[in-house]
Image (tube, rainbow, N blue to C red):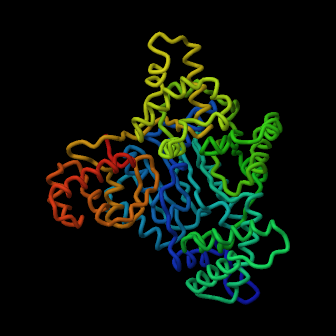
Amino acid sequence: MNSEREDHRGAPDPASNEALVEKYDAISYAAQSNPDSHPDRLATVASLHGLSVPEIATCRVLEVGCSDGANLLPMAASLPAASFVGCELSPAATALARTGATELGLENVTLIEGDLREFPDALGPFDFVIAHGVYSWVPAPVRDALFALAAKKLSRNGLMFVSYNVYPGCHVRQAAWEMLRHHIAGINDARGRLDAARTLATAIAEGGISQDPTDALLRRELARIARQTDSSIYHDDLAVPNDPVYFHRFAAHAAQHGLRFISEARLFNSSSFGLVPSMQRLVSGLGRVEREQYLDFACLRRYRQSVLCREEAAEVLALTPERATLMHAAASHSLLGAVQRSKPLFNPARSPMIATDQKQLHTALERLVAVAPRALPAAELELLVNGPASSVHAQRSFAALLVDACFADELQLSLAPPQIAEIASDRPLASAAARWQARRGTKLTNLWHEAMEIPDAPVRALLALLDGTRDRPALDAAAGSTLGVSDPVERRRRIDGYVRQFGRLGFLIH
């Protein structure tokens, strides 16, 4: 991104390195952990599609556009035997990432400030390359360089994660973007651009004269933008460049660099569950790439998170359900949300293939809900469902059932799940990354690498104390005064309740 071009007014090209750095310095990017980019998620998806995958515990990870390390550092803290390299253009963001790595005592992290096109040849190969929030938001030459870097640096069985905006859903978004960009064209300061964009989005969203009922789609999009955070509006809706792409063109671009699409990082997003029967029949006979494109058409998709591999590593790329027998399963957010709303444990209408094995699935999902957020070995679930004398055929059928449930978003599968304690011990222990984050902001990363919003400062202060050395009386002595409760019995009750909630949210280590 070293362009020297200038626009017609003599201002620096908005896609130049200088402009991009200035943009991120003007309005800080609210980075957070992304569980879909975690090496375990990527390896699980690839393994289920028949590929050999890197060893997660000792893997080498490169994150391009790592920002302040919000995604990279918690991964590095949870995988101490693995190594992590972050590449970031913004000096300010890189400095924050370096500070975080130092304060967390992470010796397995290397941070590089600079253009990805100047990435050091000496570093690599990498088992995982992560590019979250990069592909659509950089100029075309840098998109080429991103794939060229992955093609050069990925190990033989390495995997790449790429997030990007897509059509057809982004056509509506793009109409909103163009109106907002026109409105702010004469405003130079970042805060003024944000305020003006939010004002216009709010005004149009409120309604008025329309020529066609379909105009409501655009009004809803502008209403959504008006509710977004400053970071989201400035670095996505107002971002230049921001280039959505049709999926088939993305896949072709990757193929030019010897990279092949495997699946979406969330398997549900590569499934046809929930489509009307006519659409399911239409996509059933299509090839992998064309099928994904028609899924985008069917759901009007606007955003993707894709998993890629080397072309030579994907000689046989086919769903292999029996791999699930060696994995672990955990209740999905969708399932836990359904339970909280007193809905059925699974949805046969969305999961027609699962409906034939309702009793087996019900038993398995009940067990996963009971131990959530912990994961259980698939073999343990299979023993619970089929008993100790189950046949090989029964085991394979159960593995297929788990995979179908994963595609239906009822559970998530994992090769190397975190060691979570769903029940707090006498001396509860939260992850080092979450304790560190609790002292600095409201977004905390749990052991599933999910970003959790904890707005209450006293509650975060309590979590920061969970280093495994304090029992309940010690926690009361250290944090009780900040809870604003004078009665000691009530204060202990609240501390117990908060600690139990930390367990349910996946912060406590077994």
**Outermost right residue:** 211
- Residue 263 position, x and y percent, is 66, 42
The residue lying at 46 percent from left, 56 percent from top is 451
Quarter assignment of residue 49: top right
From this view, report whether residue 395 is shown above or below residue 102.
Answer: above
Q: In the displayed structure, does residue 100 sit left or right of residue 354?
A: left
Foreground residue among 71 and 213: 213
Is residue 39 at least partly visible in the picture? no
The residue lying at 61 percent from left, 83 percent from top is 193
Q: In the displayed structure, does residue 469 sit left or right of residue 101?
A: left
Foreground residue among 236 and 198: 198
Q: In the displayed structure, does residue 368 sit left or right of residue 7?
A: left
The residue lying at 66 percent from left, 66 percent from top is 138
Quadrant for the C terminus, please: top left
From this view, report whether residue 229 is shown above or below residue 116.
Answer: below
- Residue 366 position, x and y percent, is 46, 32
The residue lying at 45 percent from left, 61 percent from top is 69
Q: In the displayed structure, does residue 162 sit left or right of residue 71?
A: right
- Residue 50 position, x and y percent, is 63, 30
Foreground residue among 2 and 270: 270
Q: How many marks?
A: 0
From this view, report whether residue 143 is shown above or below residue 52.
Answer: below
**Outermost front residue:** 342
Is residue 85 at least partly visible in the picture? yes
- Residue 1 position, x and y percent, is 64, 70
